[in-house]
Amino acid sequence: MKINSHQSSHHKGRFAITVGALVLVASQLSGCAVAVMGTGMAMGALVATDRRTTGAQLEDQNIELKASGRIGTALKQTGHVNVTSYNRRVLLTGEVATEADRATVESIIVDIENVRGVVNELLVLPVSSITQRTNDAIITGRMKAALIDAKLGANVFKVVTERGVVYLMGRVTNIELDIASKAAQGISGVTKVVRTVEILTPAEQEKLRKEIEAKRS
């Protein structure tokens, strides 16, 4: 999925690569030049700590680590790029200085082994402020709490927030996705909800249910 082009900016600022769904406020307030933080229907029966296989989780970690190093080198300490991999699908959020940088980052991700797809939501804008990133972290925390209140569990979705836009990632059912989307829309400061998920088929839901039951027994 592509976003519309935005006016190019040659703003020079700190370069940060954020890995993972929840950006820690304390890390955002530090002076680091490069930060890697690293996103109804039988619902309770499907809740699991992580719906990815162990292999997929390890691959996601490797993808994020490889991306952080390569992007940092390519952009030469400019911009603010968040890399979040879930089940080998990569979400890119943040800001870059030029449209060429945006394309460069995407090409870097595509070339990483095991990546299955890229959702490029990078904006050609000045780097977001510490205040904006703090607000985004607060929204992410509230979204996690809302998921728990909705009996979905905090880890069914990986939540990423950037400039008030909430991105939902995960392997979920349509019902879970609808509930999470409505929960996000009710959170103050959320401007939009972007759903970048894999919808579980009935067969996948049954397989997951059996796996969870086996772990509990």
Image (cartoon, rainbow, N blue to C red):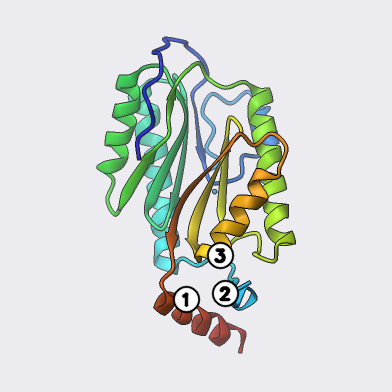
In the rendered view, tell whether residue 125 sits above or below residue 30: above
Say which of 86 and 61 sits in front: 86
| Crowd rating for badge 2 (residues with CA inside 10 Å; few <14, some 14–19, many 20+) | many
Asked where in the image residue 75 lies, by quadrant, the reply is top left
| Crowd rating for badge 3 (residues with CA inside 10 Å; few <14, some 14–19, many 20+) | few
- Of labels 3 and 2, earlier in sequence is 2
Residue drawn at point x = 57 percent, y = 74 percent: 46
Say which of 150 and 26 sits in front: 150
Q: Is residue 22 visible to us here?
A: yes
Question: Which numbered tag is attached to residue 205?
Answer: 1
Question: Which numbered tag is attached to residue 175?
Answer: 3
- Of labels 1 and 2, earlier in sequence is 2
Residue at image mark 2: 46
In the rendered view, tell whether residue 148 sits above or below residue 98: below
| Crowd rating for badge 1 (residues with CA inside 10 Å; few <14, some 14–19, many 20+) | some
Kindly state the secondary structure of the residue where label 3 is placed: helix
Q: Position of residue 217 (x, y in %)?
A: 61, 90
Which residue type carries mark 1?
A: Gln
Q: CA distance from mark 1 to mark 3?
A: 12 Å
Is the Cβ of the residue at disc 3 closer than 8 Å to that at disc 2? no
